[in-house]
């Protein structure tokens, strides 16, 4: 794919899916749809920066990170917070290689690799027929075959974090990707990793394409060795006729991964008889929960690698089971135990919703500290059902989380973000507390906390609040600066805000999303014809 089409697709994809699947969609993304002229400016600047051929010419900012709970108890993943324009540049660079990468992968027709098959359509990047669901269905289908007496399940340990950038560079060059683009991507990733030579930014579609490219050699080697496997991201399944073959295939994978500086997660590696695997799979499919008597504190989080943060309505089959669940009994049992099984925790929450016992959600506060990683999920549930709480329930919830913030010596950033989201919601709104937190915000409390506080204050802050907040503009990061501008624009009258906003152009002359927030692009009569031409080109289907 040529550079022009890659940039167009990168912009369209960001408009469709946002910057990442980890953090909330920021208002900056919507600036692209509000002004065709601004979108054209981003397009032109992205083209120019990539053609510079250097990281300095790209004008890329350093990455901020936030720890997010992984799919095992007490495990965390370092998730990347990439600036909007940097996200577009990174994705555009990788998209120029995406078709070449896809052609070098194990062909779709072989039904082996189900993750992130590149097939762009209307701004989306992936083949909709190759998903985690398709992977699971194919695993079930293969497991039923007579030759598949044993099923090997394993995944790569800390795959994104341990991916070697120089080996990735060599892989891309070996499949005839454009050398200049490959070298520029490598320099960009080395810059973001502080020259550490390891790691892809977690949460980016660009990283997903590169992570799949990195396993091309491994997948092809397994096929050459006769290994009967299926893969989704870093998760492998082998279908072996006996224990000897299963053992051999596992050693083949371990040895080949070792050549890439990778290893399998030994604690999660299993070799199971076909019938046991199928029974476990059927139970998991029906209940959507994972239980392990030897390790009851593993949470099934899907293949995103993080603990669920969003409440989703239970399915009809789930509702039938949850309607008769003894919530009171489970809560009493949980209060006695030192730790609460994650799946049980989620079931209690869902049962409260299904049985319409909303006040029982307040009782969960007594056990929430036994699995803190699920706090964002719990708070999301509260927000999505806030209209069902009594004033007394709201007060109890507010008191609890206010106390947590005031009395805790250290609060992980992901928890603080969740607390702030609660206090910024309609029913649980607490402007005084949000202002206080912003006033006392420490610069080492995390790159994202300040921005989330400002997001929560949008629609709540008045002119007096903003006079104070405006003072912090010069020492704020880019995420905070853009929201401060937006807040000022919404609270100050025209005469008061115009001089201050106009001055922004002198302070941050190169940050296009910030400038657009301060002074939205307006189409003049002289530009109307050019707008029609550029708009038509940007909106072409790829």
Image (cartoon, grey):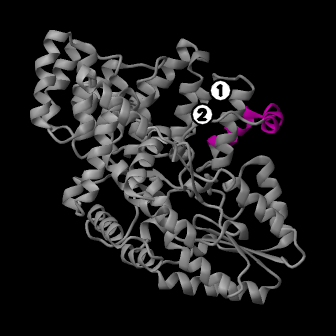
SS type, badge 2: helix
537 and 204: which is toward the camera: 537
Horizontal relation, residue 458 to residue 133: left or right: left
Residue at image position (68%, 33%) is 313
Horizontal relation, residue 388 to residue 506: left or right: right
Write down the quadrant of residue 450 in the picture.
Answer: top left
Residue labelled with disc 1: 360
Residue at image position (60%, 77%) is 219
Write down the quadrant of residue 269 in the picture.
Answer: bottom right
**First to last magenta residue range:** 316-335
User: Please, is residue 161 above or below residue 206 in the view?
Assistant: below
Query: Residue 258 location in percent, x, y?
Result: 50, 84
Query: Residue 82 location in percent, x, y?
Result: 34, 49
State whether residue 375 appears in this view. yes
Query: Residue 163 location in percent, x, y?
Result: 43, 71
Mark 2–mark 1 CB contact (< 8 Å): yes
Residue at image position (81%, 63%) is 140
Horizontal relation, residue 35 to residue 143: left or right: left
Horizontal relation, residue 254 to residue 54: left or right: right
Residue labelled with disc 2: 364
């Amino acid at each position: 794919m040529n550079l022009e089409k890659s940039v167009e697709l990168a912009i369209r994809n960001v408009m469709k899916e946002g910057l990442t699947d980890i953090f909330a969609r920021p208002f900056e993304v919507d600036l692209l749809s509000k002004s065709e002229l601004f979108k054209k400016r981003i397009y032109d600047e992205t083209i120019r920066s990539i053609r510079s051929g250097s990281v300095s010419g790209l004008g890329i900012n350093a990455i901020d990170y936030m720890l997010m709970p992984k799919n095992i108890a007490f495990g965390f993943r370092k998730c990347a917070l990439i600036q909007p324009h940097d996200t577009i540049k990174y994705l555009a660079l990788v998209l120029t290689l995406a078709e070449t990468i896809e052609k070098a992968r194990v062909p779709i027709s072989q039904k082996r690799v189900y993750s992130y098959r590149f097939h762009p359509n209307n701004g989306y990047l992936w083949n909709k027929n190759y998903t985690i669901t398709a992977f699971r269905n194919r695993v079930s289908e293969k497991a039923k075959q007579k030759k598949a007496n044993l099923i090997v399940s394993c995944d790569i340990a800390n795959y994104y974090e341990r991916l070697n950038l120089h080996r990735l560079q060599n892989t891309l060059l070996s499949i005839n990707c454009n050398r200049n683009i490959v070298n520029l991507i490598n320099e960009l990733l080395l810059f973001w990793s502080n020259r550490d030579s390891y790691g892809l930014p977690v949460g980016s579609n660009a990283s997903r394409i590169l992570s799949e490219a990195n396993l091309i050699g491994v997948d092809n080697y397994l096929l050459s060795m006769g290994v009967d496997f299926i893969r989704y991201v870093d998760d492998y399944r082998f279908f072996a006729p006996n224990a000897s073959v299963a053992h051999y295939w596992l050693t083949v994978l371990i040895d080949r991964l070792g050549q890439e500086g990778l290893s399998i997660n030994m604690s999660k590696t299993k070799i199971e008889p076909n019938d046991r695997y199928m029974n476990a799979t059927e139970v998991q499919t029906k209940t959507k929960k994972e239980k392990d008597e030897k390790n009851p504190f593993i949470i099934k989080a899907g293949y995103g690698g993080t603990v669920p943060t969003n409440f989703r309505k239970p399915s009809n089959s789930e509702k039938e089971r949850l309607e008769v669940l003894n919530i009171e009994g489970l809560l009493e049992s949980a209060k006695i135990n030192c730790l609460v099984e994650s799946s049980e925790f989620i079931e209690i929450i869902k049962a409260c919703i299904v049985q319409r016992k909303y006040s029982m959600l307040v009782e969960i506060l007594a056990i929430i500290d036994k699995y803190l990683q699920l706090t964002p999920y719990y708070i999301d549930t509260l927000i999505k059902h806030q209209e069902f709480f009594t004033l007394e329930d709201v007060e109890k919830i507010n008191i609890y989380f206010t106390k947590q913030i005031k009395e805790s010596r250290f609060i992980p950033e992901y928890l603080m973000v969740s607390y702030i989201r609660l206090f910024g919601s309609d029913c649980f709104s607490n402007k005084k507390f949000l202002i206080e937190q912003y006033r006392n915000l420490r610069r080492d409390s995390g790159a994202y906390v300040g921005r989330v506080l400002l997001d929560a204050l949008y629609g709540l802050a008045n002119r007096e609040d903003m006079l104070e907040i405006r003072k912090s503009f010069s020492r704020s990061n880019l995420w905070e600066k853009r929201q401060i501008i937006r807040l000022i624009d919404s609270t100050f009258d025209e005469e008061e805000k115009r001089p201050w906003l106009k001055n922004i152009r002198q302070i941050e002359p190169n940050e296009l999303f910030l400038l657009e927030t301060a002074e939205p692009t307006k189409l003049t009569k002289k530009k109307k014809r050019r707008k029609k031409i550029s708009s038509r080109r940007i909106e072409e289907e790829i």
